[in-house]
Structure formats: C-alpha cells, structure tokens
Amino acid sequence: MTETEQTLRQRFTAFLQAMYNWETEANRVDEEEVEKKKTLSWEDFCKQQTELRIPIYKEYITERERKNGGPEYTSHGFPPNYDPSKETITEVQITGKKASIFTDRVYAGMNYKREYKYKLVEGRWLLDTIKEQYLPKNKEPEKWKSVII
C-alpha cells in the first residue's frame, strides 16, 4: 500500500467516524427532545446541528455549491447513514490529483456499493462526491445515483 493510499484510507475512515458521531448526537438530541416534549425549537435544533456539521465539512469535504447538501442542516439518518462498522473498503484508485474509494456497505439490512470521489486540494484529500448503487438480491444492480453530502 502506498503512502497516498494509506492517507486516503485514513481520511475516509476519519470522515465516516466524524459523520457517524454527528448523526449519533443528532439522534440523541432528537430522542431527548421527544422525551422532554420538544423544549428546543426546530430553528434552534437546525442551528445547533449546522454548527456541529461545519467543522466536518471544512476538514473533509470540498468547498463548492451543493444543490441539496452542504453543512447547513436539513436532516440526519436513523440508523446513521455513515457508520464505519457497516462499510468496508474494497478498492482504492488514484489518478493524479483525483481518487476514488469504493466500498461495500450495509444500510438497514440492504447491500450497496459506494464510490467516494476525492480531489487533492492544497495538499489535502477532500471528498467531492459520493455515488451509490443498490444491490438487490437475485436481481441486476440498480444504476449509480448521487448521494447528498
């Protein structure tokens, strides 16, 4: 394994862990709010979650306009969409200043393949896009589709 591949794998794992930690916290706050009968307004909750997401985006994701994504909070998954224990790297491809990490992923009992596309920006590998393909049992895989980051 090259040093570049090792760096990419480490950044990928750190990104997954950061997003998992954020989603787990958002779910905890949601649950706590339900038990307290919603003492936190929706606007305050969104602001709180956006503040938690901004450092993750600055550290791991390319800065560009995203139609349906970005650091501004809109939703989170339950179970979490990003879970390092549910995703396995199957391949790393590096071509100059671009790279892809391919994974096998299990989410809510369903199997997927994912491609995380990275760009080398000012000496750091930053995630630019994610594509996903659902792999139904005993059927042809579905087409690749973009994942909102």
Image: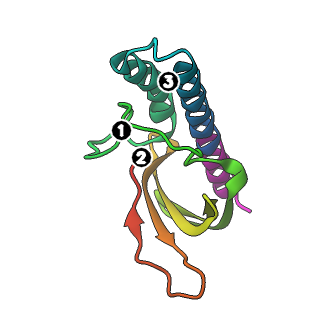
Please state which amino acid type lies under the numbered disc 3.
Leu
> Quarter of the image containing the N terminus?
bottom right
80 or 21, nearer to the observer:
80
Please report contact status of discs 1 and 2: CB closer than 8 Å, yes or no.
yes
Q: Identify the mark at residue 93; answer none if there is no mark.
A: none
Q: Using the rendered image of the protein, determine whether residue 61 is visible from the camera's viewpoint.
A: yes
Q: Which SS does the magenta portion mostly show?
A: helix
In the rendered image, residue 142 lying in the magenta stretch gets the answer no
Q: Residue at x 38, y 19 (%)?
A: 47
Residue position marked by numbered label 3 in the rendering: 52
Viewer-nearest residue: 86 or 11: 86
Q: Residue at x 36, y 35 (%)?
A: 74
Contact check, label 3 and label 2, Cβ < 8 Å: no
Quadrant housing residue 20: top right
Q: Residues within 10 Å of mark 2 (few under 14, many from 20)?
A: some
Q: Quadrant of residue 91?
A: bottom right
Label 1 amino acid?
A: Gly
Inspect the image, locate mark 2, and give the three-letter code of the amino acid beneath it.
Ile
Which of pointers 1 and 2 lies earlier in the amino acid sequence? 1
CA–CA distance between discs 1 and 2? 6 Å
Q: Is residue 14 magenta?
A: yes
Query: Can you give x and y, in whole percent of width and height, for residue 18 in the image?
Result: 60, 35
Would residue 91 be found to the left or right of residue 136 on screen?
right
Residue numbers of the magenta segment: 1-15
**Residue occupied by mark 1:** 70
Q: Is residue 84 above or below residue 43?
A: below
Identify the element where label 3 is drawn.
helix
**Circle 2: element type:** loop
The residue positioned 51% from the left and 32% from the top of the image is 56
